Amino acid sequence: MPNNKKKNQKIINYPCPDRNVVQQGKAETDDHQHFDEPHMLERFTPEELRNELLKERKRVIQWRVLNEASVILNSQLNSENLPLKIIKYAKKLVSAEAGMLALEEVKDNGLKTIKHYTLSDEQKEKSIEEIVQKPQGAIEIILQTGEIINRNSSRNNLDDLYGFYTIKKSLLGIPLFANRRIIGALLMANKSEGASFSQDDQELLMILGSQLGIALENSRLYEKIDKELQAKVDELELVNKKLRKQHIILEKSLEMHHQLTGLVLQGKGIEAICETLTAFIGSPVQVEDHNFSVKASTRRKTDKKIISGKELVKEKQYERQVFELFQERKTVELFSDVDTRQYTLPIVAGQQFLGLISTIFVQRTIKQLDKVAMEQGATILALEILKQRAAVEQTKRLKETFLEHVLDRNYESTEWMYHRALQLGFNLKNKYLVITVEVAPERTDRSRPELLQEIRDFCIDAYPSSTVITKNNHILIILSLNKNKEEIEVKTLVRQLKKRLSNLLRGGSWWVTIGTMCEKLEDCFISYRNAVTSLDIMKSLNLKNRVVSYNNLGIFSLIEINPHNFAEFAKRTIGPLIVYDQEHKTQLVKTLSLFFKNNGNVLKAAREGYLNPSTVKYRLRRIQEITGLDLKDAETCLQLQLALRITNCDLSDG
């Protein structure tokens, strides 16, 4: 390959067949130096003068060709036809029949040769372009040494003329330099009319070659810069497309944000937000609260099912998605089948989890704009939920304050109370009932305020129409009940409340008492007083973890009896049995209750309690031994039944 260091140019002139030609050329040059002097014209014959004029004409043509080639070299920096054009100009410049340009090919790691022939028989031109891996002959000499070759057919062979294929009569080759480095070679072959290439031809070709080397290097630099520039242009165009796309998404996102914000400001609610999102993304949308209750949905019966948050938590296959959704608060994608993709986002405000928003896409991918719309929806829904919560909290506080006044009978008049109740949304046609809850946690349990707050939250979630008040370390649940359904609703709530308390207070104690049903709102203070009375009796009898209703106090509920006296009566009558059962894990009180319930019939009592009659008889004997009472005495039996009526008041099913 070419040597990177520029060597001193060395011209090799091989002996010509007729050395007189050189001497003649020299003489012609000497004569030409005085050609412009008028008195010298007399020294030339007409024939000699004609020859001199032809030589001058030839020089003018050569310089004109050289000038045209220079213009092309300086103007066409990125022309693919530039090498072939230069070969043609070079042939014309030195009157050669064939020309070849050999250039380093950087891409293919070889040598690119471009050859041009003039076919004398038909006066046609032929061009050949090829890539060779290793230069040979004259090309190799020029590329390695940087020498100028000017030789005739007496020294030419096939190896020296590699690339031309046939032996030429004369050959002129020069190196091409760029930045002091050889980048190629320009070769001319077969001087016209069988002559040899002259010193003038060599110098003119050198001038053209120097300009060609510079032009080729500039062309390569231009192409490199052009490619880099085009790459930058393509990159900028790609960035521009992304920016235009993002701009469109931003515009539509702002439009969506304005629409959704307007719905919140107008108080349209969660359902309107869902409908707007559905219209925007073209898919059904479902919103759930923090308890996974569906608050709004645009899903039709014909649409595919949306996987709810409750189903996600239960299904083990969604364990990863559940962690990302609820722990990392990230958006998740679910695949219910091959064609259906679900997109679910958490609705959060700070660190507070407010719910979920989900949509499904059937037989289509989720677009970036769809994701942006759902994210906007989640943000707006968080604002709407917080707004609703704030309104509910405000109303709840007003209701709590109002009911505290009702329970304490602290209001101006009944008319004012009714007016205020209607303002706060109370249904005056409903019945009302007061339930008290008290807890005594162990050290291993959570603190009392934490437990009371959790019980409050549970009651509000389980029965939204209730009002929960904390008063005198008790939790008061004031229920607003529909007529004809009050018994079922109360039993359902009490069952759920008992289960919740049992889970919260595994080592502590709890008491739940139920007051009397009120037909009017102003009578709630009576229900409250009765519930507190029942609570005092339970605690006096050391009865815990039970639910007691004031209505089960029987005849004692008809009279104003002192709770302490009431409790003392029950304690004195069956107190020893209660203590014995608690210490020995027996069921003497229950057996005694079965005995009186079946009118003293041992067989019926045993059958109802799934016991052996002998077991019942044994327990009755132990009851008489412990209490010292005679079960055959009518007065004693009446006292025992009344005491049992007080203590056996559990409304739950278990």
Image (tube, grey):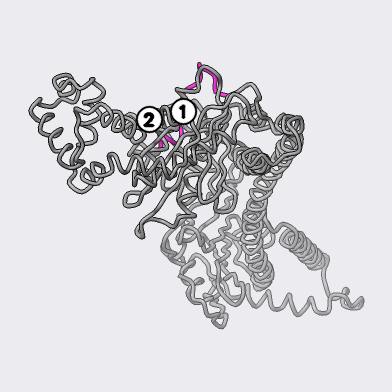
Q: Nearer the viewer, mark 1 or mark 2?
A: 2
Q: Position of residue 554 (x, y in %)?
A: 41, 27
Position above or below: 392 against 509: above
Q: Which residues are magenta?
A: 298-312
Q: Secondary structure at mark 2?
A: loop
**Residue beneath the point at 69% across and 71% down:** 207
Q: Is residue 463 left or right of residue 118?
A: left
Q: Is residue 493 magenta?
A: no
Q: Please tell me in which quadrant of the rendered image residue 444 appears.
A: bottom left
Image mark for residue 490? 1
Q: How many marks?
A: 2
Position above or below: 592 against 151: above
Question: Can residue 516 be seen in this snapshot?
Answer: yes
Quadrant in which the N terminus is drawn: bottom left
Q: Is residue 307 magenta?
A: yes
CB atoms at circles 1 and 2 under 8 Å apart?
Answer: yes
Q: Please tell me in which quadrant of the rendered image residue 190 appears.
A: bottom right
Question: Can residue 286 be seen in this snapshot?
Answer: no
Q: Earlier in the sequence, mark 1 or mark 2?
A: 1
Front residue of 50/634: it is 634
Front residue of 141/239: it is 239
Q: Which residue is mark 2?
A: 651
What amino acid is at disc 2? Leu
**Residue beneath the point at 57% across and 51% down:** 117
Q: Position of residue 476 (x, y in %)?
A: 53, 41
